[in-house]
Every structure is written in C-alpha cells, then in structure tokens.
C-alpha cells in the first residue's frame, strides 16, 4: 500500500473547539506513559524489536507515582499487550483504582504488515485509511483481550496522527486522543506538523484532544513560535537562544528536559491560565540502557529525582493530579 507523500499540518484549535473546564476542576495535571517495546533509538525501526524486558521495572515505578498520589495513563502498544507478564504487571497497576489503560499504535510492530517499512510509514497517520484502521483494530482487540475492556484513550506512535485518525478513533468508541505534541514539527522525517497546536485541550471530530504540553520560556517567549522556527534554519541558533536565557522550548517530560527548565515551564503555563498540564515519558526509560535519556544508574536516579521535584513544584502551584476518567468527565461535562 502507498502512504501519504505530503506532510499533514494539523489545523489550530478554533475558539469553538476549545474545552471549557468547569470551575471545580481547577488546574490539574495528568501523566501519560508510553508503555512500549525496546529498540535502539539511533537505528532504523525494525519489526523484530518486540522485547519488553524493561517492564520488570514498571511495578516499582508505579509504586513511586502512587505514593505521590499520581495516576498513570498507560498507553500500551502491541508488543506489550501480547506479553503475558507485562499484562499482569499492568493489571496490578490499574487495581489502584486511578491508573488506566489506553492504546498506543506502533505501526511497524502491529499487524497487518501490508506496508513497506520506511520512515514515513512508521507514522500511522500516513498509511492509507484502510490500513491504519486495520492496525487500529488489531491494537484495540489485543487490549480488550488482555484487559477485558475497550480502551478510551489513544496515542499514535511517534505522534503520527493523520487526517483520517480522529474519525477512525471516534467510530471505534475512543473518546480521547493524545497524539499531538504541541509546537513540534516532524515534517523532516515524514511526520505531522504541530506548529499551530498550543496547550489548550479541544474537541474535534468527536474526539477530546489533549496535546502534550510544551511551553516557551525565556525573555523572548512572547515571540516563541516564530522565533523558534526561524532559529531552526540557522545552525546552533536554538542552543544559543537557550543558553542566553532568551528562548527555550520546554516539553513536560524528564526525557532530555532539565528539571529547572521544566519547573519554569510549569510556572509560565500556570501564569498563562493553562488548566490541564499533560506530562509524559516512555516506559523503557525505567531501566538503564533502553533510551538515550536513561543510560545508566545515575541517569535513572536523576529520572526519579526529576519526578519528585516536579510533583513538589506542582503542589506549590496548587496543581493537583487528575485521572483519565476525571479528565474525560470534566471535558465532556
């Protein structure tokens, strides 16, 4: 099958699409974890990479989050859903009554395999609608078989949403999509462009969209989108802007985002009136050696320390954790 050959530029949220959070909801945050197989992030993706050994670290991580009163929205992909031991760990995690299971579609390891394995085809939204739908059906069925209920939340692997993704999800009973990474542009690798997407939650084509929170910080942050885009055309310009304190683009994740920058981003977002902060990480980062962000024991200690400091900072701002069910009820109400 032939994939899309032109980039998908995701339209900005219109005013009439924005979620109006009820006053009692307050300002909240939610943590998504991409629960996925291990692979070498520096090498081309392969269908054979289906190992899930890092899941052995998941119960300890879940305990750490639960001790902080934080639920995990676990976006589970096909290799994990097909691993009985991993499924058992996740079942025990959601017994906390707050954590939840959603779907994550890694197209390159999810049948049917009717497409060539190219960089563009690893973004599921680039696939022909029938093939994207077939892979989504495989993924959904695997999660129902593993956990006994249909998932309501979805994330496209590599944030690879396409023009047909939202209606395909809505037709299958999904309610929430969290595939959009605010202010990021993946066109250079054949992926979508989220340059027009900010941090506001919105409803489109029957789906509640929760973009991953990204904040511009620094003295020039009011020029953030245009200045950051322009700096990308000049070698090292973005690094110079960040080091001089003029402009940084900060996603709310411990993966390659220093805690000092992330705390500043939370303060900026809170000051701008953002009502829901969306944080995220990848499950292979829970064990050293599987991602570029956690290479050894020292990195892992720093990873856990990042979360401890972040939760303290969120409490300082009066920003409380939310479950996926609480977000869904507030957004739909």
Image (tube, rainbow, N blue to C red):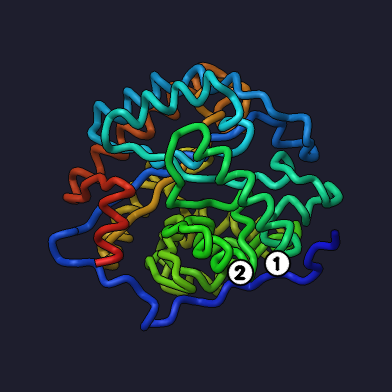
Question: Within the image, what quadrant is residue 100 found in?
Answer: top left
Lateral position of residue 20 relative to residue 88, left or right: left
Q: Residue at x 27, y 72 (%)?
A: 20
State which quarter of the image contains the N terminus. Answer: bottom right
Q: Decide: is 107 above or below 78.
A: below
Q: Residue at x 43, y 27 (%)?
A: 90
Q: Is residue 245 visible?
A: no
Viewer-closest of 2 and 141:
141
Query: Disc 2 vs disc 1: Cβ atoms closer than 8 Å?
Result: yes
Q: Residue at x 35, y 32 (%)?
A: 94
Q: Decide: is 74 above or below 89.
A: below
Q: Decide: is 321 above or below 57.
A: below
Q: Is residue 128 visible?
A: yes
Q: Which residue is mark 2?
A: 229
State which quarter of the image contains the C terminus. Answer: bottom left
Residue 53: horizontal and vertical position, in percent?
60, 19
Q: CA distance from mark 2 to mark 1?
A: 7 Å
Viewer-closest of 295 and 236:
295
Residue 326: horizontal and vertical position, in percent?
26, 52
Q: Secondary structure at mark 2?
A: helix
Q: Residue at x 35, y 34 (%)?
A: 307
Question: Within the image, what quadrant is residue 203 found in?
Answer: bottom left
Label 1 neighbourhood size at 10 Å, few (<14), some (14-19), many (20+)?
few
Residue 214: horizontal and vertical position, in percent?
45, 58
Specify the label residue 129 is tagged with. Answer: none
Q: Which residue is mark 1?
A: 233
Label 2 neighbourhood size at 10 Å, few (<14), some (14-19), many (20+)?
some
Residue 138: horizontal and vertical position, in percent?
64, 45
């Amino acid at each position: 099958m032939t994939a899309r050959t032109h980039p998908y530029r995701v339209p900005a949220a219109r005013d009439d699409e924005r979620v109006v959070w009820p006053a009692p909801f307050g300002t909240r945050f939610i943590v998504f974890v991409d629960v996925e197989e291990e692979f070498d992030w520096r090498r081309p993706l392969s269908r054979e990479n289906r190992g899930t050994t890092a899941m052995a670290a998941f119960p300890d991580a879940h305990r750490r989050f639960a001790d902080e009163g934080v639920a995990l929205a676990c976006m589970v992909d096909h290799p994990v859903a097909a691993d009985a031991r991993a499924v058992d760990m996740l079942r025990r995690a959601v017994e906390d009554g707050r954590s939840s299971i959603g779907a994550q579609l890694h197209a390159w390891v999810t049948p049917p395999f009717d497409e060539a394995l190219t960089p563009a085809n690893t973004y599921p939204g680039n696939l022909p609608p029938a093939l994207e739908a077939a892979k989504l059906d495989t993924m959904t069925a695997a999660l129902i078989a593993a956990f006994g209920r249909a998932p309501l939340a979805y994330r496209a692997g590599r944030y690879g949403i396409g023009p047909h993704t939202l209606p395909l999800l809505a037709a299958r009973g999904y309610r929430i999509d969290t595939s959009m990474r605010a202010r990021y542009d993946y066109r250079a690798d054949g992926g979508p462009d989220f340059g027009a997407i900010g941090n506001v939650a919105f409803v489109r084509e029957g789906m509640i969209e929760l973009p991953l929170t990204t904040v511009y910080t620094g003295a020039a942050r009011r020029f953030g989108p245009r200045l950051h885009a322009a700096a990308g055309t000049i070698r090292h310009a973005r690094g110079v802007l960040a080091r001089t304190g003029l402009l940084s683009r900060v996603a709310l994740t411990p993966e390659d985002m220093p805690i000092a920058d992330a705390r500043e981003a939370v303060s900026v977002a809170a000051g701008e009136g953002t009502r829901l902060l969306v944080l995220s990480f990848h499950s292979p980062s829970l064990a050293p050696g599987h991602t570029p962000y956690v290479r050894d024991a020292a990195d892992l200690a720093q990873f856990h320390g990042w979360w401890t400091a972040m939760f303290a900072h969120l409490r300082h701002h009066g920003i409380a954790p939310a479950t996926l069910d609480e977000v869904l009820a507030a957004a739909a109400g």
